[in-house]
Amino acid sequence: DTSLRALASKQGLRFGTAVDASQLGTNKAYTGIVNTQFSVVTAENAMKWDAVEPSQGVYDWKAADDLVRSAQHNGQAVRGHTLMWHNQLPSWLTTGVGDGSISNAQLRDILRRHVTDEVTHFKGKIWQWDVVNEVFANSWETPQADGLNADDFWIQHLGSGIVADVFRWAHKADPKALLMYNDYNIAGEDGTNVKFQAVYTFVKHLRKQGVPIDGIGEQGHLDTQYGFNAQQYQADLQAFGDLGLKVAVTEADVRTFVNNATDQVPTSSLAEFAQPYEFSELLKGCELVRQCISFTVWGVHDGDSWIPGTFSGEGYGLLFNVSMQPKTAYSTLQQDL
Ligand code: XIL
């Protein structure tokens, strides 16, 4: 068995993908790849707040439950994604905050209930939760003194202390789930490495205070047009590991410019080298850091990736092409495992 999941399991690693809940079980080729290649799955959207609570107090767990059931059936662990994030919030919540009908005190109660209800609903079924997602400032954003993004929806309304509280609420609801902080550009950045430093200092402090945080998720969204400092990446992952934290690569993809979003043929033939190289380094960092427990790619094939819809003119980010055929990056990772 030379599948990614079989090769990874030989070294105690789970190899994962983000899954589009609407294709699972209905699209045969898609489902086949998910279940033969991957041993851990993340709901790409089905566990986000807007999906599970479209109107206040009315939960819809159907898509997420189906995904979890399918995972259990196929010997796959589940990464829960995500509990506190500024994106994909239900409109009843953002509207209520916007027009002042939800006060900050009420917002805090609403968040606590959301975290508690969702973690309780899936209790015992989730291996790792991305408890908090993307609250640190990027180079183009405004950092607070502690490095959190001053303009982040949650930080703005509830302050930095909310991060620790959300971890505590999640832990209370499912004491056995691994609780992760998930973000991008937090490992392998060149130069002063500001975002890594901020996350590192913040989580070190959380650990010291006894906040139940178990690990760091490095998303791993790369782009062949930017450099990727593989040595720095590995050192950064190791630094998190040395704090006693587990590490996971949670949303790997390597995008590049393409001729069009349908065929996703790279404009430069160099992409055929750059992409496998960057995927390879992303995986190797995880393999070399003992605390790294899973490596997840953000989608199954190029036709199903978020990239063309988000980064204008880009695509070709995953291990299978638009025809669901394995790419060079796939065989490269196979060899690396
Ligand atoms: C993306 C999904 O892939 C898209 O389908 C959706 O429209 C928007 O969100 N960081 C994250 C993920 O943590 O949840 C995002 O997923 C990609 C960036």
Image (spheres, rainbow, N blue to C red):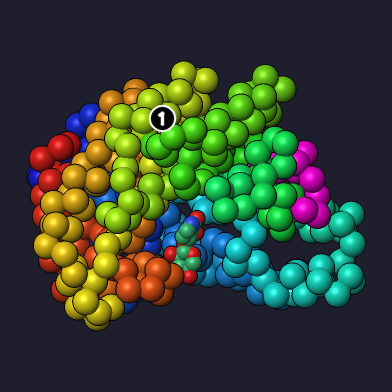
Residue in front for this viewpoint, 221 or 41: 221
Residue 91, by quadrant, is bottom right
Question: Relative to 101, does residue 81 appear above or below in the rendering?
Answer: above
Q: Is mark 1 within 8 Å of ligand 1?
A: no
Q: Main secondary structure of the magenta part?
A: helix
Question: Relative to 169, does residue 210 appear above or below in the rendering?
Answer: above
Pointer 1 local density, CA inside 10 Å: few below 14, some 14–19, many at least 20: many
Residue 113 shows in the view? no
- The number of numbered badges drawn on the structure is 1
Label 1 is placed on what type of residue? Leu
Q: Position of residue 257 (x, y in %)?
A: 27, 67
Q: Residue at x 69, y 55 (%)?
A: 152
Residue in front for this viewpoint, 185 or 279: 185
Residue 320, by quadrant, is bottom left
Q: Position of residue 193 (x, y in %)?
A: 49, 34
Q: Residue at x 67, y 50 (%)?
A: 142
Q: Is residue 246 magenta?
A: no
Q: Quadrant of the N terminus?
A: top left
Q: Residue at x 13, y 66 (%)?
A: 325
Q: Position of residue 224 (x, y in %)?
A: 27, 54
Q: Seen from this angle, which residue lies furthest front?
A: 191
Please give left or right for residue 219 compared with residue 333 in the image.
right
Q: Residue at x 34, y 23 (%)?
A: 290
Residue 161, by quadrant, is top right
Is label 1 in a helix, a strand or a loop? helix
Q: Which residue is mark 1?
A: 237
Q: Is residue 168 magenta?
A: yes
Query: Which segment did they paint magenta?
Result: 156-170
Q: Position of residue 8 (x, y in %)?
A: 22, 38
Q: Quadrant of the C terminus?
A: top left
Residue 319 shows in the view? yes
